[in-house]
Amino acid sequence: MGFLKRFFGEKKRGRGVSAKGLLLYPSTGEVIRAETLLKEAGLAVAVKGPPPDLRQGCDMVIEFDLLQELRIRQLLAQAGLPPLRVAVAQDHLLEPVSLYQVKDFGDYMMVRAANMKITLDKRDRRIVNISGGGCPDVPFLAEMLVGRTLAEAPEPRSLGQTLCGYSLQLAYEELCRQCPG
């Protein structure tokens, strides 16, 4: 069995070959609903920025394991959420772009996801700033989160439904991973 894994494993695939697929949607709302549905079904999916040659409509794609494509298509069809297009990552020279940028400033850490940033005082895990975006709910999100610790703060997804709220949720989750405790 080890021989087969080594023979067919990642190292033998060659440059640019991927076992990942990308689901493209025309709007952010559909990406959010599809991601939620697929995660609730126990599938490992991730929202990423699309390679430039795949950008159409929404600036987010859902990355998934190609071995799950049939199941994913069935779940999405049943929910009335068929993607605009399904692409194989290997068809594109560029991999999907990570939505996260993490900056450690010593006592403070800032995580950016898409257009939203959240900054944390690492000494007491208190959120000190929310910035970015252009959605009307950003001031409300900032008011609800700034000054609270990660443990006290509500998840941004529970407060808003815009692209900015979704991006802030991703930044919040990454911040929780970066600063556990």
Image (tube, rainbow, N blue to C red):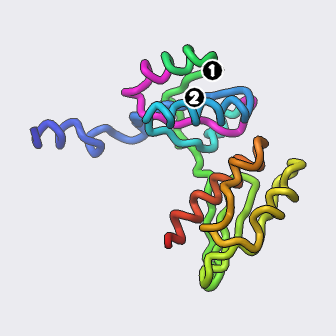
Toward the viewer: 34 or 52? 34
Nearest the viewer among 43 and 150 is 150
Which label sits on residue 81?
A: 1
Measured along the vertical axis of the image, is residue 86 above or below residue 35?
above
Residue under label 2: 23
x 53%, y 68%: residue: 178
Q: From the viewer's perspective, is residue 33 above or below residue 133?
A: above
Eye-nearest disc, 2 or 1: 1
Taking depth in this image into account, of 158 and 6 the one nearest to the observer is: 158
Instruction: Locate residue 17 relative to residue 165 in the image: left or right.
Output: left
Q: Residue at x 44, y 39 (%)?
A: 44
Which quadrant of the figure contains the N terminus? Answer: top left
Q: Is residue 58 magenta?
A: yes
Residue 131 to residue 55: above or below: below
The span shown in magenta is: 56-72
- On the question of residue 89 being in view, the answer is no
Q: Is residue 12 left or right of residue 170?
A: left
